[in-house]
Image: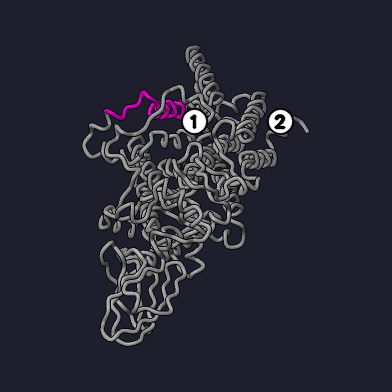
Amino acid sequence: MSYDILINSKKTWYFMLFLTVVIVSIPLFTESLVWGHDTTFHLARIEGLKEGLLNGDFPIKLYGYVYNNYGYPVGYFYPDLFLYIPAVLGIFFPGVMAYHIFLFLITLFTAIISYISFNRLFFHILRENKLPHYVYGAVASIIYTGALYRMMDLYSRAAIGEAIAMSFLPLALISFYLMLEGRKNAWIGVVIGATGILETHILSSLMLFIAYVCLSLIFYKKFFQQCNLKAVLKATIFVILLNIWFYAPFLSMYESFDFYMKGAVQSAKNIEVYSLNDLFRVQFFVGFFSLTVLFGYAVYLIIKKAKKQNITILNKVFCVCAFFCAILILTTSSLDPWDTIASIPVIGDKLGLLQFSFRLTVFTSVFLAIALSIAICANKKFLILALVIVSYNLLCMTLNFDKHHFLVFYRAENVAVSSKLFKLRGTEADNILLNLVDVAHNPLFFLQYGDYLYKDLQESEYGYTNKEKEELLEAVKSKNWTKLNPYEITPKYAVTNFYREGLHLNFTTNTDKATEIKLPLWFYPHSYGASCDGEELPVFEVYHHRLAVTVPAGEHNVKVFPKLHTPYRNACIISLFGLLAFIWACIRAYRRKRI
């Protein structure tokens, strides 16, 4: 088989894409749990969803796994649609295996979605016939799937929401651009891409909105063309309908619920930045090889321009992407503009929500993949050599992440509960590491967090100091909790046959008068329901934000359970009808295309 036939074959590039997925996923092919900064947080979310599903709840806004089943409202504030996948997997597979399968699926779908997206872009802009458009698309997808920042999200930071958002980012950006270019049905890609990001990571959604505004301003003439305005309106309506089921409760709770959030910053000038030296560290950003190729091809184009040779459309696209890469790299370095941005009214404060400037690297990764694909594919002989170098770099990283402080592996026998507190490199300090069984069943390791709880809730009521944690390690084994007792009921004499399964309580009361019963649950508005002998029973809030019911005199069977009340339930129904309408619109568009 000749070289030209090999590189022009789709099968070659499908194999290369799959090989990239396998290489990037090497850390997952082990019995050890890949532990990153936020692993405990996401494992707790997954376990909370799994417990809710096993109890028959859906959608799940309150997690009963952490805080001794007092109810954790993170489901209102953090999108979790795709976390139902590892939650379901966790029902059938061990926790570590389910988590690793999920991370593998994220990488696999990143490769597939990015290939489809980049392929569509190059099909639109490619005018030369040196290589087919799918070669450019595959090379860009390989680079994007193996992006250092994406792997950092998966393994080092364990920023699972942002990693999933990166899977949809090329589709969301490229489809929006093609929609402004008048490509028919590109709005479908906008809806799918934007929804994928909105349902995974709110901060990425904020950045995507800003990117859409910037693209609209750059292509303002095309934006205001009648056919494009119709497509934008159609995409906007479907995005709202598909995501209102999450964002209606989110906005309601955000405005009405006074919650604590440790990670929030007050101004854009407080955004954490890194020095330019970090650009060349293996953990951060785009890597030395990528910058070298980018700079080398840019010099080649400058020389070509100086000789007054024609610059093709493809090379113009390279220049635009390289320009955006340079701008984004500078905004994530110590030469950042955040002090200036912070002085802008309203905008400065809102952008402070980004927390870290390196979050912008998700966009750098997209522009870099496009630019590098153009540079690498410019020379057929350099193409294979470049891919070999990329593959070698990926292998070196995935096989040696632990040496670069990029990954931390812990086997169950090495993290079993003992009298010693283990500390993870690069993670929140003072974690208690538990063995696999403990991680699956005991929520104590998560009790150091206070995000999304009531702001006036004293940490001493639910958290433990380091000294208390050491004293309680033996109690962990016996589940002898001293705080947040899951069976604490007031008054005790009024309740018998108490039984709980997660956030579901079932008990019998026998009193000689109407009695207020304080239960071991935190109260959240529009989140619980109760029944007394099958009749609806109101729930309300008492001191320390505890949930309570008032039962009538006599003997009664009382049940308390998570329940989305009418406003939130209606939002779910609207999204369901929106999904059906979107599917119908996609089928209709597909049939028209075939005709």
- Asked whether residue 334 is drawn in magenta, I would say yes
Label 2, secondary structure: give it.
helix
Counting the numbered discs, the total is 2
Query: Which residue lies at the image location 37% right of the left edge and 65% below the top edge?
Result: 574
Mark 2 highlights which residue? 4
Is 66 part of what is drawn in magenta? Answer: no
Front-most of residues 541 and 529? 541
Can you say whether 226 is above or below 405 in the image? below
For residue 73, side relative to residue 252 (left or right): right
Dividing the picture into quadrants, the one containing residue 399 is: top right
Q: Is residue 185 visible?
A: no
**Does residue 456 appear to the left or right of 66 in the view shown?**
left
Up the image or down, 451 lies above or below 60; here it is above
Q: Residue at x 40, y 57 (%)?
A: 75
**Magenta segment:** 319-339
Q: Which mark is residue 284?
A: 1
Q: Residue 57: in sight, yes or no?
A: yes
User: Residue 48 bears which disc, if any?
Assistant: none
Majority secondary structure in the magenta region: helix
Q: Write the residue at 45% across / 51% down.
A: 471
Q: Amino acid at mark 2?
A: Asp
